[in-house]
Image: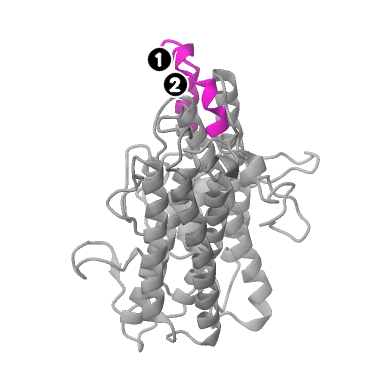
Amino acid sequence: MFAAYSLGGPQVPAEHHDKVARWQAVLLGIAREEMGHLVTVQNLLKLLGGPINLERDDFPWDTPFYPFPFSLEPVSLGSLARYVCIESPETWPDPWAKRRAEIEGIGFPGGASDFKRVGLLYETLKNLVGDKTLIPDDLFHADTLSFQASFAEWGRGYAAGARGATEPGARVPDVLIHTAYSRSTALDALEAVAEQGEASHADGDKDPAPSHFERFMGLFLEIEAVTGWTPWRPVAANPRAVGDPDAVPGTTYIGNPVARVWARLLNLRYRMLLSYIAHSFRISGDYTSADGLTRSAVLNRAFGEMYNLRAIANILVSMPADDPKQPERAAPSFELPYSMDLPMLDRDAWRQHIDLLQASAKLIGQIHGTAGSAADAYLDSLLALDGQAIATFEAAVRGSRGPGLAYSVGGRA
């Protein structure tokens, strides 16, 4: 998402606007598919009786399982080369195989020794899940199926290549959201996610949907051919909107006070998105609003926040990161609070959503009038929709006090 938001800007010649918009659509399409992968993995955690995991460190960060130390950075040949390499299959197809060592060197100074392919991680997961001596059959909880996310709820029209095509009319993969109720269905889900990331399709395949590897490679080759202009804005790498300006090495503090509040608003809406996703896994899809547990309420809000992030990011990247006389632009920092844990009681989880919406209203009050009439119209609309959400969540608080309501903490009703 950060890479996609960095594309565009006033430095892009008018005759190239459509091309850059298509590149951005490709990146956002992949980001949506990665969201599907994230949700699928949460389903597998539910199946195994574990807590869902939406936590991470602030950027830059690294873990032993991550393909490489991760930073938020604008699109460049280097960043695209890194995306190509980590999503690549073990064997590169022709004619790209001839450039493999070169592209690995563009992305990583040490070549292939500097990164780990995502496919290796999924092979490790498949080996673990498939080993009955490590995970016995009785640890697969089929009764969590109604608490898992489904494509029917999350697909939202993202089937049959509905977005992010590399060429007009070309196919792209569906957003994959797999539920699982057994070892075999869990392995099927892991295989599908891995295939969408790293598959390569030989010539002659009938209407193939290109993988992430293939689409990243296509972007790399197109942007490599650009001469005389720059497709991306000079946005700050690893931007930060909270804390001491000099506290975190490797980050860029957003010193411009207006841009900093916009960035804090984006951080808050990002937290809200993840909170809605987390809450949705607590509520069985078998329940209806008559039960007082409105899963659709948090799902609808989650999708709304995806659009809000894009809208706020597009405003943010037009603002200076610090000195207005300098070219560096602000950018979304995607900072999270110290904990993403939801309250234990259901009514308090709904109250937390209300608290975050009220906190957002305070930030909106600080930035209204700072980014033009179109931005103000967006903020006014956002406040109105948030008011409706607060009313919905207050009704859920009242409903969750009633007797006899089923409630899930660990995945069982």
Identify the residue at image location x=63%, y=48%: 214
Residue 38 on the magenta span: no
Question: What span is in magenta?
Answer: 122-147
Say whether residue 196 is left or right of residue 41.
right
Asked whether the residues under the numbered discs 2 and 1 touch, taking CB atoms below 8 Å apart as contact, a structural biologist would say yes
Q: Position of residue 300 (x, y in %)?
A: 58, 54
Q: Position of residue 399 (x, y in %)?
A: 48, 46
Most distant residue in the front direction:
403
Say whether residue 144 is left or right of residue 339.
right
Amino acid residing under circle 2: Leu
What is the magenta segment's predominant secondary structure?
helix
Residue 132 on the magenta span: yes
Instruction: Choose top left, top right, bottom left or bottom right for residue 190.
Output: top right
Say whether residue 263 is left or right of residue 42.
left
Q: Which mark is residue 294?
A: none
Instruction: Find the distance from the CA under tag 2 to the CA under tag 1.
Output: 7 Å
Q: Along the polypeptide, which appears first: circle 2 or circle 1?
A: 2
Label 2 sits on a secondary structure element that is helix
Amino acid residing under circle 1: Leu
**The one of 399 and 360 positioned closer to us in this rendering:** 399
**The one of 130 and 77 positioned closer to us in this rendering:** 130
Identify the residue at image location x=52%, y=77%: 380
Label 1 sits on a secondary structure element that is loop
Identify the residue at image location x=40%, y=68%: 360
Q: Position of residue 282 (x, y in %)?
A: 46, 38
Residue of label 1: 134
Residue of label 2: 128
